[in-house]
Amino acid sequence: MSRRSMRRAVAVAASVAVAAALLPGPSYGDPPRLDPEAFCRAEQAAFCSVLVIDTDAPPPSVAGLAFQPVATRLAVDGVPGCVGGPGRPVVRTTTPRLSAAFDRMPGEVTFELVPLDGATEPEMIGVPVEPDRTAVAELDQLGPGESYRWRVRGTGLDVPELGWSPWCEFTVAAGLLDLRDATDLDAVLELGVDPARRYPVTLPARQWRLFLEIFDEPDEGPDDFDGGPGEASDRLRRIAADVREQLSGREATVTLTGDEWATAASELAGLAGAWDDAHDEDPQIERDGAAHWTVLDRISAQLGGPAHPGLGRER
């Protein structure tokens, strides 16, 4: 073969090879997937560390992890179970307790409370865990006759919404006192008054004068009285004006709401206690809180409350 023929043959062969590389060939399916572990073991005198990431797999759910605590033995105000719909339990208190036990010790526990009518925003309540793996949420005042749903999880407030128990429901019994708007809840509860109801109280003029001392400025009461009636808040000013408008003669009847009486009675107890403290510290002060306590007892009796209320003060 001549050199010219040989060069032509080589050129043809090269052209065929290029064409073969460019032309599509038959599909034989996806190439086999590499086994990273087998590949590592085949390497001689090499230390291999393999990390396999499946980009198509969804992120793992916290609820599905082995360490996720699962809520068991759910109860509302001691009534066990988790019920929804018409069979939901009825609790006879406006401050029920939600409780749950867990199959393992959670670090934190979060309860969620939602009114069924959607009138208010959901309330998230973080509570500590007891040594027996139980948790209890003490609820604030709820509405009589209203229904709520709740759930719980064994994680803190800052954890994404994973691991919740099923939704459970309950209803607060109708006819209970609605204490959600009580100004001084402790005083309302001790006196047993309805915050919205109006109560008449009758006292002689001299006892009304003692009662009105709760509205005096600080320098007109005991020197050591701190942070009580002497501050004369706008609310106390309104109550004082209402009382003074109704006073006349040697005896007068004053009508206020239960919420207003609770506020005034709490201030009166604070004033009586302050005079007692001042007298104990300096016996030369002839006056103590006895006369003010007597006025408070008479007011409480006419409100239907206890004979000798303390309202946060020792007597």
Image (spheres, helix red, strand yellow):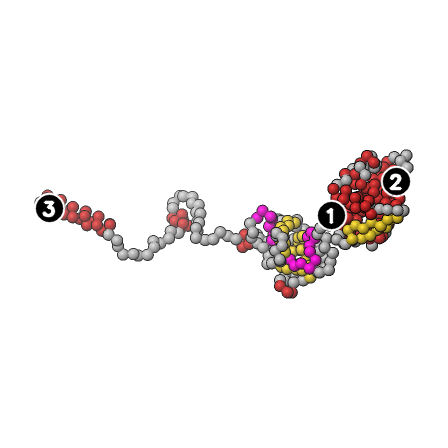
Q: Is residue 304 visible from the viewing direction of this image? A: yes
In the image, taking residue 153 as reference, residue 95 lies left or right, namely right
Estimate the x, y position of residue 244 in percent, counting from the top left: 82, 44
Q: Nearer the viewer, mark 2 or mark 1?
A: 1
Task: Determine contact: label 2, label 1, CB under 8 Å.
Answer: no
Q: CA distance from mark 3 to mark 2?
A: 133 Å
Estimate the x, y position of residue 72 in percent, counting from the top left: 63, 58
N-terminal of the pair, mark 3 or mark 2, is: 3
N-terminal of the pair, mark 3 or mark 1, is: 3
**Residue bearing the label numbered 3:** 5
Q: Element type at marker 2?
A: loop
Estimate the x, y position of residue 311 in percent, counting from the top left: 80, 47
Q: Is residue 132 visible from the viewing direction of this image? A: no
**Residue bearing the label numbered 1:** 183
Q: Amino acid at mark 3?
A: Ser
**Residue bearing the label numbered 2:** 288
The residue stretch that appears in magenta? 139-159
Q: Element type at marker 1?
A: loop
At a point 77% along the width and 54% down the height, the residue shown is 197
At a point 77% along the width and 48% down the height, the residue shown is 260
Q: Nearer the viewer, mark 3 or mark 1?
A: 1
